Image (cartoon, coloured by chain):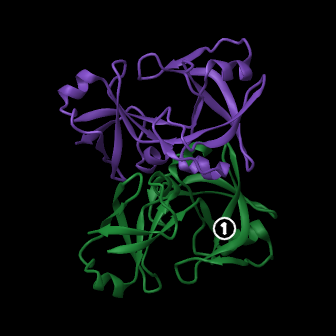
Chain colours: A purple, B green
């Protein structure tokens, strides 16, 4: 089967509390709706600071969540001089400490991870595609640099729609683009 | 079979003429010998400038060559706002124009490419490994993010030794490291 691909650049999710520390009472505005229903690219950016470096203009995604999380690629993490673990979104065990800087304040906490490769899917799609008995699938991107990605985690939620998420290392390595169709192998 | 992996960060090769424009009469010093015999990481760095951005501290590799070439990853090229083609080293057809800036001067020319995945090998190794009849092989990296890279070009020269070269997108996407062993599948 083929699914749509989304390549995730480094980005930040924030709790309401941390959002207020960084941005005060400014509302979180929508710049662009994302493929996953309700998720959006916001009008807010932060800087991410470590002992080694500061990366500016990192996008905050909305809506606000129950956890604050900075998602980076391995390449970003080398640039920042940190060693974040690969994790499911929301699993911050062993996450790397960074400082998030906004116009009104800053927050320092262990919240940086490398997101795992994952396939967003809802229960109906999962059943229809006969993926009830597996936790991971394989994705294949065909082009000038054919690449097979194993260890793609299935991320099921009634609100999700079918979409493969790769980070910029994986997606750019395969010379792929957001919005293209890619093959999923069970 | 297993071979050693080298992950290539963005770097620059220079002709003698362009080297003199950028660095004048300073000698090109060796900082570290690379795995391929005679190749080295030099003591010289340049900046790479495009209309969108300037990236500082890009390493010059030695020795000097018959062509000037800037090797970047797709992620680097997005950052720079250029669209370089994937090429064998030395094949600059359609290469993207960038400006290389050194302490003594600068050079602007179409010389930026994304290097293809390639396996350095010498004729004896190629024969011993029964790779005479193929132009490309497949590499598999096992770890937290198992990845299969097709389209690995065989690059044969009597001076080469067996080594797989991936750029930072491919290598970091697989959470791999320079010096680790990876599997080559015919």
Using residue B179 as the reference point, say whether residue A128 is left or right of it. Answer: left
Using residue A157 as the reference point, say whether residue B49 is left or right of it. Answer: right
- The residue indicated by pointer 1 is B60
Give the letter of the chain under mark 1.
B
Determine the image quadrant of residue A128. top left
Q: Could you tell me which residue is drawn at 66 percent across and 11 percent down?
A: A27
Residue A60 rendering spot, x and y as whole percentages: 60, 26
Closer-to-camera residue (B129/B52): B129
Camera sees residue B37 = yes
Closer-to-camera residue (B19/A118): A118
Relative to B171, residue A58 above or below: above
Q: Could you tell me which residue is drawn at 67 percent across and 19 percent down?
A: A17
Q: Secondary structure at mark 1?
A: strand
Relative to B109, residue A159 above or below: above
Determine the image quadrant of residue A63. top right
Using residue B31 as the reference point, say whether residue A117 is left or right of it. Answer: left
Quadrant into which the N terminus of chain A falls = top left
Circle 1 residues within 10 Å: few <14, some 14–19, many ≥20: many
Relative to B18, residue A60 above or below: above
Quadrant into which the C terminus of chain A falls = top left
Closer-to-camera residue (A147/A51): A51
Residue B7 rendering spot, x and y as whole percentages: 52, 63
Using residue A137 as the reference point, say whether residue A7 is left or right of it. Answer: right
């Amino acid at each position: 089967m083929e699914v749509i691909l989304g390549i995730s650049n480094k980005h930040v999710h924030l709790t309401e509390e941390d959002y207020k520390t960084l941005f005060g009472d400014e509302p979180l505005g929508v710049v662009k709706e994302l493929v996953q229903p309700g998720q959006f690219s916001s009008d807010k950016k932060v800087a991410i600071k470590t002992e080694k470096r500061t990366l500016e203009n990192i996008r905050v995604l909305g809506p606000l969540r129950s956890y604050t999380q900075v998602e980076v690629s391995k390449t970003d993490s080398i640039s920042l001089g940190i060693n974040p673990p690969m994790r499911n979104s929301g699993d911050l065990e062993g996450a790397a400490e960074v400082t998030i800087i906004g116009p009104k304040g800053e927050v320092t906490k262990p919240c940086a991870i490398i997101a795992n490769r994952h396939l967003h899917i809802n229960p109906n799609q999962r059943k229809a595609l006969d993926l009830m008995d597996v936790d991971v699938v394989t994705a294949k991107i065909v082009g000038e640099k054919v690449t097979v990605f194993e260890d793609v985690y299935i991320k099921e939620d009634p609100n999700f729609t079918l979409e493969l998420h790769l980070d910029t290392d994986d997606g750019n390595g395969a010379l792929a683009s957001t919005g293209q169709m890619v093959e999923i192998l069970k």
